[in-house]
Image: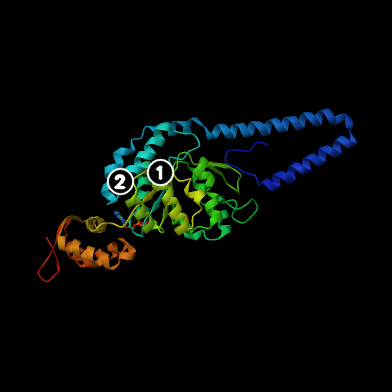
């Protein structure tokens, strides 16, 4: 059966239609045996057409456009983005180098049936795990939105169907899976599985093929989804202190990985087999005070820029205050900083706008008030 591009027929209808046709042909063959050769020829013709359709599908997967795009991708020099990544995600230079090196190597090798890299980022909340994955997406695929899945919404075993689509006929099957459909539509994407440890174990199992062979089957459409041009990031908040200890105690990469897998199986409840499928387990540990100050500065500049004002200088006392506040809210990482800076400098923004300033220096006077120059 030939279908136009993109059109899909519900498999149940297909089976019913085929049964109907087969039944009709059978009755016809019974009543008029002389038609038997024609019936056989017609069946063979239908079979041939079906095979041609399947071959065309296969070709489309390797269409010249897809091949060209992957060739262009292989030319990408991701190391050009290393400095930009390190300037924006502070305090994780080694992790950034490791990830960039791995993805660059995958681009050069263009290994079939492998993703560009799969990374489990482990660290306390608010250390930049999600942020780093988002920026990697900007560097790798500036024109494609990353697929961000909050895995704490996949706590039930039925959520497998949200991920790879419900079986045909079930509600929502035409929408496809939250993981599979965006990649079917555009395979050049970064995938972020946020807080993966919170997902149901069946949902985790579902990811085996993706991590192993860079493919999986969308349940609702039956189509194979290819993840060969995807970089996969998963994040995890649990098991941090054990990992920190392990990474301090040993430098040998394979011993580190082995022990890290054990610790995360024990403390984050992961299946060891799932952990073995990640290319790297990366620790993004708590930020040192200096980096907290830098993040505060970044957030300050970002916040003011929203109002069209450049911060040319910020008094060190302001940053110290931000660091002090961050220590108070340590359990949130640097997440509270943005809100704190907002509250601290909102009056300043009002004043700067009143004066029509587009560039300011933020100082602190003797009474601890922010002054603007
Ligand atoms: N290392 C960092 N460098 C720069 N900004 C950071 C860093 N860590 C966190 N941030 C800021 O804090 C916000 C929250 O961080 P996020 O990446 O969501 O943390 P998590 O590790 O919990 O995923 C980010 O959007 C970013 O603005
Ligand atoms: Mg996060």
Q: Is residue 110 left or right of residue 300?
A: right
To which residue does mark 1 refer? Answer: 254
Disc on the earlier residue, 1 or 2: 2
Q: Residue at x 35, y 41 (%)?
A: 100
Where does residue 254 sit, x and y in percent of width and height?
40, 43
Q: Residue at x 81, y 41 (%)?
A: 23
Viewer-proximal residue among 53 and 121: 121
Where does residue 145 sit, x and y in percent of width and height?
41, 48
Q: Secondary structure at mark 2?
A: helix
Quadrant location of the C terminus?
bottom left
Viewer-proximal residue among 303 and 200: 200
Query: Is disc 1 surrounded by few (<14), some (14 to 19) or many (20+) residues within 10 Å?
Result: few
Q: Residue at x 64, y 50 (%)?
A: 168
Q: Secondary structure at mark 1?
A: helix
Viewer-proximal residue among 15 and 225: 225
Where does residue 137 sit, x and y in percent of width and height?
38, 46
Residue 22: assigned label: none
Can you say whether 273 is above or below 307 in the image? above
**Which quadrant does ligand 2 occupy?**
bottom left
Q: Is residue 343 visible?
A: yes
Q: Nearer the viewer, mark 1 or mark 2?
A: 1
Q: Residue at x 83, y 28 (%)?
A: 37
Quadrant location of the N terminus?
top right
Q: Is residue 232 left or right of residue 62?
A: left
Residue 94: assigned label: 2
Where does residue 39 sit, x and y in percent of width and height?
81, 32
Can you say whether 338 is above or below 250 in the image? below
Can you say whether 365 is above or below 14 in the image? below
């Amino acid at each position: 059966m030939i279908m136009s591009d993109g059109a899909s027929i519900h498999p149940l209808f297909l089976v019913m239609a085929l049964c109907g046709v087969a039944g009709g042909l059978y009755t016809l063959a019974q009543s008029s045996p002389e038609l038997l050769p024609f019936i056989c020829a017609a069946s063979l013709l239908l079979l041939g057409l079906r095979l041609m359709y399947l071959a065309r599908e296969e070709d489309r997967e390797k269409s010249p456009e897809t091949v060209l795009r992957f060739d262009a991708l292989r030319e990408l020099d991701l190391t050009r983005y290393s400095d930009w990544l390190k300037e924006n995600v502070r305090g994780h230079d080694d992790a950034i180098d490791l990830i960039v090196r791995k993805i660059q190597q995958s681009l050069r090798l263009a290994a079939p049936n492998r993703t560009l890299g799969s990374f489990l980022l482990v660290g306390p909340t608010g250390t930049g795990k999600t942020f780093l994955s988002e920026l990697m997406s900007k560097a790798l695929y500036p024109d494609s939105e990353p697929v961000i899945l909050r895995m704490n919404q996949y706590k039930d075993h039925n959520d497998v169907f949200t991920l790879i689509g419900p079986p045909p006929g079930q509600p929502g099957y035409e929408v496809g899976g939250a993981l599979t459909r965006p990649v079917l539509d555009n395979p050049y994407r970064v995938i972020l599985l946020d807080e993966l440890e919170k997902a149901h174990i069946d949902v985790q199992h579902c990811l085996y093929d993706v991590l192993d062979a860079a493919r999986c089957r969308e349940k609702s459409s039956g189509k194979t989804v290819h993840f060969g041009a995807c970089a996969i990031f998963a994040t995890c908040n649990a098991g941090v202190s054990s990992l920190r200890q392990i990474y301090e105690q040993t430098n040998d990469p394979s011993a580190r990985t082995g022990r890290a897998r054990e610790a995360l199986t024990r403390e984050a409840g992961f299946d060891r087999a799932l952990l073995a499928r990640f290319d790297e387990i990366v620790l993004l540990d708590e930020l040192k005070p200096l980096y907290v100050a830098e993040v505060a500065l970044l957030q300050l500049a970002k916040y003011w820029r929203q109002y069209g004002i450049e911060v040319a200088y910020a008094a060190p006392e302001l940053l110290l205050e931000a660091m002090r506040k961050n220590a108070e809210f340590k359990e949130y990482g640097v997440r509270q900083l943005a809100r704190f800076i907002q509250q601290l400098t909102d009056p300043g923004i009002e004043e700067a706008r009143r004066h029509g300033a587009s560039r300011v220096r933020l100082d602190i006077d003797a009474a601890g008030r922010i002054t603007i120059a």
